[in-house]
Every structure is written in structure tokens, then in C-alpha cells.
Image (cartoon, rainbow, N blue to C red):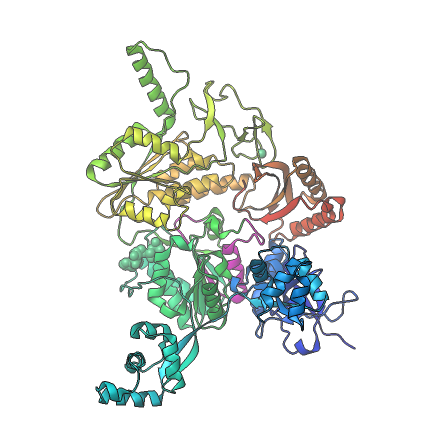
């Protein structure tokens, strides 16, 4: 007899799908994209039907336990997209599908225990002394309700009850049943309406103001009156509150046939009130041009990507809104991706103001129920626009016309800490090309990759060159901190000479120049605001020359060498190059070689010493960890309760405070010196962003950037507001050293508790890979990661540069990597389960 077979993608770390038999009763319902329950080893897992094989690959296949969907969760289109992701990002298909499943739909497995014993009394008696745990379980169950294992654990105050349960099950005293249920369900609420009879009695009530003839008790009357004004069904909760009555009173009215209570589904929505009606806006010429060009592509119904390049406030969001309007008019749907939804509530409010109930928001701060509702509304085509962070790219919309990726360069689009390690921007482009949709990548500071694609014609560039409000660009001044230090040194010398004292052994660290100090003081006098940026990341120490600012770089990779405190050496974490730290500066011969790392806290102290009268707020991870702290700090600063806002890159994003006329960057070098090939690009982006915080149409802003490398190209172009100039130089450097966009980078990471094991595994994997290297890719390392140990686990990296010129789709590298991984898994190494191997394609961070 022919078996009805299905291939199932399961969320297990194995690079394959699994075949099961569909039992006859499920056969008519088993469709591709539907979720099923299966036994896998000793576990029960939920997976997705992805295929219908004709022949069984092996003997002894198991049947499906159950089918979880009446309608498939995943469309053909989503199956195709997730499959591409699985191949491109080296992630099991089942894991990708799991990431694309909204949380509320995931199955929470619970074991339910039910009493089956006939004579409970004698069972209780029998266990009383000999088996106290069983006795307690029986006692808990004796009133007839099913209890979950978790509930039983709580009631019996014992955690290890599994053995007891097992024995009792064997004796036939209880049954244990696995019940799978979705964690979120549609939310139902009670609604109430007057029946015709109710309306009649109301009529009587009205006619007779006399208490006695009213017949109904006052609470019931009050309820009927509360319902009398409404034509439609009312929420029960609201009515009860309004009438000051209880549910039982309402039930009494129901029994008398005066009201009808029904359950109806309600949609849970998160807080974006109040929504004001959108202002009437006439697009300026640049916006019009952008909208018209994009509209033409939408009409042609073909895939195309636009790079919309315009500073903050140049009207990009308005362009998204107008193009979405066209998409909806054409009967299609849209996805809007934003980097971090908690930082962009205004954007969400704006979309709601324009598109009202056509929009659903999806983000992680929403409750499981809210997320589930948003997902379901999209799945059932009851909404047309989904807005959210990276995971919103999985929105189950059909007929997509447009995908917007706002601030496309943001690293938060990349999932870096769990499988699949995807970049939502790139997935958006693939999804759009599968569905003949248009993509808008919007940015004030595009990534080098996207800018290159726009220059080469792969994308079309649209520019919004001016701010809508005509604010002037701020004037930007670079302060050379090496000179500043010399100046401090000379002052100190003079002072020491005057008082004939002794010269200090160590020079004081100066993080605020006198230029910056004077400018801040001016702002204090004028009651204007100052933003100070100190983007210090704790973990990367570099060694620099105090006199000239020289910092050692790798001879091979042109990235900053990192100082390793334990081994006391400098190391390149791309290629493993090692060097002793210099004692004499190779550039100027100076001997003041020291660490460079001062954080926001130190700067805060120094500022308070220099300007004790200033009211200062610090904003970094430490001061914003509590919910709402971020907003509170911004409010305080915005309303003028503080003079200075000092913080990490958080202060660079999305803030719009008219009172800010000065922006100071304490050290442009902290970002510039991170051992990452994107450090110059990130510096340029960050400085451009933070500079944009200063100045309005009436008050021109000033920006002070302090640095030890005033001649660095990323600074030069920030000062002259020259985007193309920066990208030209940056792309030149990338081309020379085969970094993206000219190559694709793949990071293979080994992690584990024993350093020698981690190293050995990495070395072996490198050996499996090395023979295929050459024409299509090169292999660097293994080398200790820039952060060599996290949470007591050592990390070693192999870095692969995959050349786009010879292997444009990456398929050659993929074949080689799959082969190397198979060899690795077939070898004795794979027995060591304590070493974790991860493959990260297009990593955003290289640390
Ligand atoms: P961006 O997304 O580039 O930061 P927005 O679209 O948010 O720019 O525009 C900045 C502000 O200017 C918003 O308050 C917006 O309502 C307003 N705005 C946008 N376009 C126009 C226009 N053509 N005329 C007047 N105001 C506009
Ligand atoms: Zn190197």
C-alpha cells in the first residue's frame, strides 16, 4: 500500500528535514506550510510540513502525532523565503521557520494529570505512611480537577514528583496526558445587549417613575438604564462599572430574558494613543520626484530597490507614507522596518494617524497576546501594513507591494546572537524580489554596501538634499587633543616652575579641551542645551602614544591591534598577528605609551570639576536599564531641567531638541579605533548623526569633535558634510583589502570552556576548509576573538573573505563550507559537545 509521506522541518540543529507518515484521518488536511506535532527521539516537537516525498528514505518511519493548523501558517512564498535563508545563513530550515513563527503560536507543552483510581479513600489510606509524595498527589487530585504537573508540584510543595507519578500511572491510579496548546488564543470578551423583551420592560420602567410598579430591584434597573442608550452591543465590563452592578446581577437579567450576553473577539492593541489627525502636507520638489519615481516602479509590478538618501528631517518618512498610500490603492500591502521600535514611537503614531486600522505594530515589548493578534490580523488579511523591527520582515502578509527599511545601515537589523543570524534588510530585498515588490532603503548615512550598490546601478539612488524646515547645517570644528595635551603640559610646566614644585610623574588625562569647556560655559549663560557624546565600549583597550596619538595597526589587515591585558601583547583578531606593545613610539619617539579608554562616568566627573554649576544628565546603558528611564531623561533634558546631556551613542539617535545649539564629541577615536573594518564608516555615521542634533532654522548649531587623529579621512568629510567624498575613500580602502561590499565575510566561531580544545577545533576546521580556498575565497586565522572570553567561554574565529567577483552568489563558498562542516561532524571532534560552532554570514560586528 502506498504511504502518504511528509517532509517536516524541525527546530533542531541538524541540516536536514525529516520524513513522517501522515495517518489517514489527517491526510485531507496536511498541506505545505502547516504545523504538526511529531515524536523526535524521546521528545515531542512541533515542525512544519515542507514537502511530500514519493518514496520513503528509510524503513520504520513514524506517524505524525497531530496537525496544528487548519489553514497553513506559512504560505508558499514564506516557505521559499525561509528556505533561502536557511541556505544562505547556514541555519536549519526548521530553526528559520521557528524564528518566523510568532511567539503566541509556539506550542507550550503541558502534562495533565487526572485521577483514575476507583477507591480514593483506600488509596489515600494505603499511601499515608509509606508513600507521602503519592499521598500528597492523591490529596491534591481528589476533588476531581485535572492538574498540570507544574500545578501539582506547587500544591505538593515538591519538585521531584516524576518518579511518584510514574509509579502511580503504572498502578492505574492516574492517567498522564500530553496536551499541546497554543500559548496565545484570540481574546474573547463578554458583550451585552438588550433583548426585545428588555427594551419592552425598559419602556415600562420609563413610563412609571413609581418605585413600586418598577418591580425590578434598583441594581437591575440601573443596569437596564445603562444599556438603554446604546444601539449596539456594549462591553460587559464597561456597563457594570458604569451601573455599579455586579456580573451576577447581569446574569439575573439574562435569565429573565431581558438582556443577551455574547462572547465576541476583541483585538489587543498596544498603547499608541493619542493619535492626532495628520497635518496637511504638500511635498517639496525632491519628495515629489522620489514619490513619482517609486510610484512608476510600483505600477510596473516588478522588483526594484531604491536608496533614499536624505538627512534626518528631510522628509523621508513622508515619502514612505505617500508611497504606501499608492500601494494600498493598488490593492497591495506593505511592511515598514524600523531599527528599534521603542526609540521610534512618533513614527508609529504617524503611520497610525495616516492609516488607522490598516496598520499593525509588531515588537518585542508587546505581550504575547498582542503579538499574536497582530500576526493573525496580517495572516487573515485584515490589516495591510505591518510596522516593526527586524522580525516584522516575517509578517504573513500576502500580495506585498512595498517594503521600507528605515535607517538601513543600522546593525540592529542583524540578528547576531541566535540562529538564524540574518540581516532583515537583506532578507527584505530577497523577499521583495520573490514577490515582485519594491524596496525603499532609507537613510541619512547609508551603509557602504548600499551606497556602492546605488553607485553601480544595482539600486536606484534618490536624494533629499535639504531639510524640510530649512535648518542650517551646523559648523563643525575639529580639536586636536594631542595639541591640547601639549598645551596642558606647557601650562603645567609653567605652573610647576612658578611655585618651584616637583613635576608630576604621570600627566593628567584630559578629556575636555579648553575650547569645548568655553563653548559649554557660553551655553550655560544663554540657557541653551549641550549634548556630549562619549561612545566608549568597555572591552577594547588600545595602546597609544600620548604625545602624537599613534596607535599600532595590523600589517595585514589595517585594523587596530588590541591590547590583551593577560598576555601583555598586541593582537590582530582578524588574522592572529601578534606583536609586543612598543615602549617607544615608532612615530615620534615619545615614551608616554598608555592605554586609552575612558568612559562616560570619568567624563562626568571631570565635567563636574570643571563646571560645577552645570546641571548634567548621563545617559548610557547603566542609567537607562529601568523601563521608562530613557524617556524620563529625554523629557528632563528637553524641558530644560538640565543643561548637558552626556551619553553614549544613544544621544545620537532621533532626538530633536530645539534648545540644543552645541554638540561635543569627547573622543572621535573610541569608535574609530575599534578593531573592525567598519570602524571608519561607523565613526562617520555616528558623527554625522550626532552633529545633526545641533541647530535649527533660527539658531545655527556648533559641533566640536575632539580627536587624536585630526587628519583621519572619516573626520575630514564629516566637517565638510561631504557624503560622496567619504564613500569614495571608504570604498577604495574596502576594495584594496577585499572587505565588503567587494567580498562577503563569513565568521566561523568556536566557543567553549577549555581554551586548548577551542583552539584545536578551530584549527582542524580551518584545515578542512583550507584546501578549497584560493580562487573563490581566502581563510584568515584561526585567531582569538577581540573579546577572547565571554561568560567564561573562550572564543576563536576563522574569518572567510568570499570574493564577489569570482563567486557572486556565494555558492562556491557554500559548497566548500558544507563539505568542511560535514568532515568536522564526521570526525572525532564532533563528539565533544561542549564546543559550540556557529557560522555567521555577513556579520555586523567582528568583535
Ligand atoms: P525624515 O523621515 O527624513 O526624518 P520626516 O518625513 O519625518 O523626515 O519630516 C520631518 C518633519 O517635517 C515631519 O514633522 C514632517 O511632518 C514634516 N514634513 C515632511 N515633509 C514636509 C513637507 N513637504 N512640508 C512640510 N512639512 C513636511
Ligand atoms: Zn591582521
Q: Position of residue 514 (x, y in %)?
A: 29, 28
Question: Which segment is the magenta one?
Answer: 417-446
Q: Residue at x 32, y 71 (%)?
A: 241
Q: Position of residue 488 (x, y in %)?
A: 33, 21
Q: Exactly how many numbered labels are in the figure?
A: 0
Can residue 805 be seen from the camera position used here?
no
The quarter of the image holding the C terminus is top right
Q: Is residue 275 left or right of residue 299?
A: left
Q: Is residue 444 above or below residue 112?
A: above
Q: Position of residue 679 (x, y in %)?
A: 47, 39
Q: Is residue 439 magenta?
A: yes
Task: Single out the residue that lies furthest toward the left.
Answer: 526
> What is the quadrant of residue 178 in the picture?
bottom right
Question: Which of the two residues, 825 or 705, is positioned nearer the viewer here?
Answer: 825
Q: Is residue 281 magenta?
A: no
Q: Position of residue 376 (x, y in %)?
A: 49, 69
Q: Is residue 744 above or below residue 154?
A: above
Q: Residue at x 67, y 40 (%)?
A: 762
Can residue 469 be seen from the camera position used here?
yes
- The quarter of the picture showing ligand 2: top right
Amino acid at each position: 500500500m502506498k504511504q502518504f509521506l511528509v517532509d517536516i522541518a524541525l527546530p533542531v540543529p541538524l541540516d536536514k528535514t525529516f520524513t513522517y507518515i501522515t495517518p489517514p484521518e489527517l491526510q485531507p488536511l496536511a498541506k505545505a506550510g502547516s504545523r504538526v506535532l511529531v515524536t523526535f527521539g524521546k521528545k515531542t516537537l512541533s515542525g512544519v510540513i515542507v514537502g511530500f516525498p514519493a518514496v520513503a528514505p528509510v524503513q520504520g518511519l513514524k506517524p505524525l502525532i497531530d496537525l496544528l493548523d487548519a489553514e497553513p501558517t506559512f504560505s508558499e512564498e514564506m516557505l521559499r523565503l525561509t528556505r533561502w535563508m536557511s541556505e544562505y545563513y547556514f541555519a536549519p530550515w526548521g530553526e528559520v521557520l521557528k524564528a518566523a513563527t510568532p511567539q503566541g503560536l509556539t506550542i507550550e507543552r503541558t502534562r495533565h494529570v487526572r485521577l483514575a483510581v476507583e477507591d480514593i479513600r483506600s488509596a489515600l489510606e494505603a499511601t499515608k505512611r509509606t508513600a507521602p509524595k503519592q499521598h500528597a498527589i492523591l490529596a491534591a487530585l481528589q476533588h476531581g480537577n485535572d492538574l498540570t504537573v507544574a500545578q501539582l508540584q506547587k500544591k505538593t510543595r515538591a519538585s521531584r514528583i516524576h518518579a511518584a507519578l510514574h509509579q502511580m500511572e503504572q498502578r492505574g491510579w492516574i492517567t498522564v496526558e500530553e496536551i499541546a496548546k497554543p500559548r496565545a488564543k484570540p481574546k474573547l470578551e463578554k458583550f451585552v445587549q438588550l433583548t426585545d423583551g428588555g427594551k419592552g420592560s425598559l419602556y415600562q420602567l420609563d413610563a412609571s417613575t413609581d418605585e413600586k410598579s418598577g418591580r425590578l430591584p434598583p441594581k437591575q434597573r440601573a443596569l437596564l438604564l445603562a444599556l438603554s442608550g446604546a444601539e449596539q452591543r456594549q462591553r460587559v465590563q464597561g456597563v457594570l462599572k458604569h451601573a455599579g452592578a455586579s456580573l451576577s446581577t447581569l446574569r439575573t437579567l439574562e435569565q429573565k430574558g431581558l438582556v443577551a450576553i455574547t462572547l465576541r473577539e476583541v483585538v489587543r492593541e498596544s498603547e499608541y494613543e493619542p493619535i492626532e489627525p495628520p497635518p496637511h502636507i504638500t511635498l517639496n520638489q525632491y519628495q515629489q520626484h522620489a514619490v513619482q519615481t517609486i510610484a512608476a516602479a510600483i505600477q510596473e509590478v516588478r522588483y526594484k530597490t531604491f536608496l533614499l538618501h536624505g538627512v534626518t528631517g528631510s522628509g523621508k518618512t513622508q515619502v514612505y507614507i505617500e508611497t504606501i498610500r499608492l500601494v494600498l490603492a493598488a490593492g497591495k500591502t506593505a511592511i515598514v522596518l524600523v531599527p528599534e521600535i521603542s526609540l521610534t514611537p512618533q513614527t508609529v503614531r504617524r503611520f497610525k494617524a495616516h492609516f488607522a486600522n490598516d496598520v499593525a505594530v509588531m515588537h518585542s515589548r508587546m505581550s504575547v497576546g498582542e503579538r499574536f493578534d497582530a500576526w493573525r490580523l496580517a495572516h487573515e488579511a485584515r490589516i495591510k501594513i505591518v510596522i516593526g523591527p527586524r522580525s516584522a520582515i516575517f509578517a504573513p502578509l500576502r500580495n506585498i507591494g512595498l517594503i521600507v527599511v528605515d535607517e538601513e545601515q543600522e546593525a540592529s537589523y542583524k540578528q547576531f546572537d541566535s540562529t538564524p543570524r540574518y540581516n532583515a534588510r537583506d532578507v527584505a530585498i530577497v523577499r521583495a524580489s520573490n514577490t515582485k515588490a519594491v524596496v525603499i532603503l532609507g537613510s541619512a548615512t547609508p551603509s557602504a554596501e548600499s551606497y556602492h550598490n546605488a553607485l553601480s546601478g544595482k539600486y536606484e539612488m534618490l536624494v533629499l538634499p535639504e531639510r524640510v524646515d530649512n535648518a542650517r547645517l551646523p559648523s563643525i570644528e575639529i580639536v586636536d587633543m594631542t595639541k591640547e595635551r601639549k598645551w596642558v603640559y606647557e601650562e603645567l610646566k609653567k605652573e610647576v616652575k612658578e611655585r618651584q614644585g616637583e613635576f608630576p610623574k604621570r600627566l593628567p588625562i584630559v578629556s575636555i579641551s579648553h575650547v569645548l569647556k568655553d563653548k559649554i560655559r557660553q551655553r550655560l549663560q544663554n540657557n541653551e542645551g549641550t549634548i556630549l557624546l562619549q561612545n566608549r565600549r568597555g572591552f577594547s583597550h588600545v595602546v597609544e602614544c600620548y604625545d602624537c596619538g599613534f596607535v599600532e595597526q595590523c600589517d595585514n589587515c589595517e585594523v587596530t591591534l588590541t591590547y590583551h591585558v593577560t598576555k601583555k601583547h598586541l593582537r590582530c583578531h582578524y588574522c592572529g598577528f601578534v606583536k609586543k606593545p612598543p615602549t617607544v613610539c615608532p612615530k615620534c619617539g615619545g615614551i608616554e605609551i598608555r592605554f586609552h579608554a575612558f568612559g562616560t562616568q570619568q567624563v562626568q566627573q571631570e565635567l563636574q570639576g570643571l563646571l560645577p554649576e552645570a546641571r548634567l544628565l548621563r545617559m548610557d546603558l547603566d542609567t537607562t536599564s529601568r523601563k521608562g528611564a530613557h524617556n524620563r531623561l529625554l523629557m528632563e533634558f528637553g524641558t530644560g531641567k538640565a543643561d548637558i546631556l552626556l551619553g553614549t551613542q544613544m544621544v545620537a539617535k532621533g532626538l530633536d531638541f530645539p534648545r540644543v545649539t552645541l554638540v561635543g564629541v569627547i573622543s572621535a577615536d573610541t569608535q574609530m579605533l575599534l578593531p573592525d573594518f567598519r570602524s571608519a564608516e561607523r565613526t562617520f555615521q555616528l558623527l554625522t548623526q550626532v552633529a545633526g542634533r545641533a541647530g535649527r532654522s533660527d539658531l545655527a548649531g556648533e559641533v566640536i569633535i575632539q580627536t587624536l587623529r585630526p587628519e583621519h579621512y572619516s573626520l575630514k568629510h564629516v566637517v565638510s558634510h561631504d557624503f560622496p567624498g567619504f564613500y569614495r575613500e571608504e570604498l577604495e580602502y574596502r576594495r584594496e583589502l577585499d572587505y565588503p561590499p567587494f567580498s562577503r565575510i563569513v565568521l566561523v566561531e568556536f566557543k567553549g570552556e577549555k581554551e586548548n580544545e577551542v583552539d584545536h577545533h578551530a584549527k582542524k576546521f580551518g584545515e578542512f576548509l583550507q584546501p578549497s580556498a584560493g580562487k573563490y575565497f581566502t581563510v584568515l586565522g584561526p585567531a582569538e576573538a577581540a573579546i577572547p572570553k565571554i561568560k567564561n567561554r573562550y572564543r576563536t574565529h576563522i574569518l572567510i573573505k568570499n570574493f564577489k567577483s569570482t563567486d557572486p552568489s556565494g555558492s562556491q563558498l557554500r559548497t566548500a563550507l558544507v563539505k568542511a562542516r560535514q568532515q568536522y561532524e564526521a570526525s572525532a571532534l564532533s563528539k565533544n559537545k561542549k564546543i559550540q560552532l556557529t557560522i555567521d554570514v555577513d556579520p555586523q560586528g567582528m568583535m
